Amino acid sequence: MFPKLNPMNRLLFYFIFLLSHIAFATEEDSTSIAKKVFVMEIKTEIDPRMNRYVELALAEAIEVSADLVIIEMDTYGGAVNDADDIRTMILEFEKPILVFINKDAASAGALISIACDSIYMAVGSSIGAATVVTAEGVAAPDKYQSYMRSMMRSTAEANGRNPRIAEAMVDESIEIDSISLEGKVLTFSTVEAIKFGFCDAQVKNIEEIIERNGIKDYDIVTYKLDSADTVVSFFLNPFISGILILIILGGIYFELQTPGVGFPLLASIVATIFYFIPYYLNGLAEHWEIAMFFAGISLVALEIFIISGFGVAGVLGITMTLTSLILVMLNNDAFDFSFVDSDAIFIAILTTVSGLAGSFILLFVGGVRFADSNLFKRVALQTVQNKSEGYSAASFRTETMLGRKGVAYTNLRPSGKIMIDDDIYDAFTRGNYIPKDAVIEVISEEGTSLKVKEIPAE
């Protein structure tokens, strides 16, 4: 039997009981809150696009207040500089980041995996082979290997893994007793990685990783690119890039041939924006590459409108324009293509050349239909050249027209009509545009047409 309590003690007892019950209930409720597990993928080549993907994904993980981030990985590697950026982002991330190697984590993939707090691997997976190679597939010079060894070593040290083993994944000359033989770059299978501390456990799926970390109640948030970033990725497709190049070059050419039409120039400007911005956002298009494009276009315009003929400025302008379109698609370091895959170079050149060829085909084949369109009829002369209206052919001219002055009867784009002493003649310029009513001078007689230049107003 419990002793009898006076009213004051009984009240104190009930108060203590109530407080303990509230505390217990609060603790129970706090443990029942579901953890947010953020899942992202690295399943393609490590390049500027993947670099930006990881940056956006980790930003999203922060925004949704993720408690844990899991990277599902299956990659053969890629660019060292982008792998370094991703490694740094992972090391500096405040929440735990785990990696699930679902088959391969080679080269740059190994570096990124070692940067994670924990490594899990599926059966039959591998990690290692982090030797830096050139575009031809041969080992890069030692300065690059040294840089990679340093990153692997420091990353392993940061997460309590054997730095010597990490270096052996890069340098075939490093020999470690019973682990790595000299002359062979180190690569671990799942069992070997577990044995030597480069894998926490063999698992079947992400759910098993979560349970191994003692999380019972959780919500998985799988990262997907939003609509804007999906559109950006769409325009990075080489086929789409080729179409954009076609519109850029074709629009510029048509506008230069027929100044004042406007639509070709507008199409070219829009295509230029859609071409450069996605590559710029993904870290491929450098400022100097974009500047080279506009410098090339400026040289071509200078050659056509100001400099007579077509010489050094025009050739240099075309070369700079096409070169910039190619370089924008490649992850080169100021013309250093040591780590640019040869296939990527071939695709970039093929895309640009295809766009250039397509623009010429469009001009010659589509130009016929365009000439019959209502738009063309609004900007081109459509009247019949009757003699009764003052038109005359070269066969009726009894004296030379060289040096004679008159006015532009129509806009010359670069061809059109001129009027000299109330007579109308076919005429063309040296490639530049002369507006209607401008004062002109005949500089050459060529067949039935007169070659003219504009005389500046005094």
Image: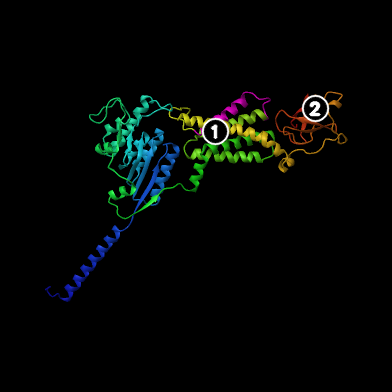
Which quarter of the rendering shows the C terminus? top right
Amino acid at circle 2: Thr
| Pick the front one: 247 or 425 | 247
In this view, 185 is above or below 377: above
Query: Which label belongs to residue 339?
Result: none
Give the residue drawn at x 27%, y 33%.
163
Amino acid at circle 1: Thr
Callout 2 crowding tier (Cα within 10 Å): few <14, some 14–19, many ≥20: few
Q: Which residue is mark 2?
A: 448
* In the image, residue 287 lies in the stretch drawn in magenta: no
Q: Quadrant of residue 189?
A: top left
- Please identify, in this view, whether the residue under mark 1 or under mark 2 is nearer the observer: 1
Give the residue drawn at x 43%, y 36%.
47
Q: CA distance from mark 1 to mark 2?
A: 42 Å
Give the residue drawn at x 51%, y 42%.
234
Magenta residue span: 305-329
Q: Which percent across, then down, holds residue 251?
A: 63, 37
- Name which of mark 1 and mark 2 comes first in the sequence: 1
Which quarter of the rendering shows the N terminus? bottom left
Callout 1 crowding tier (Cα within 10 Å): few <14, some 14–19, many ≥20: many
* In the image, residue 312 lies in the stretch drawn in magenta: yes
Q: Which residue is mark 1?
A: 351
| Pick the front one: 453 or 124 | 124
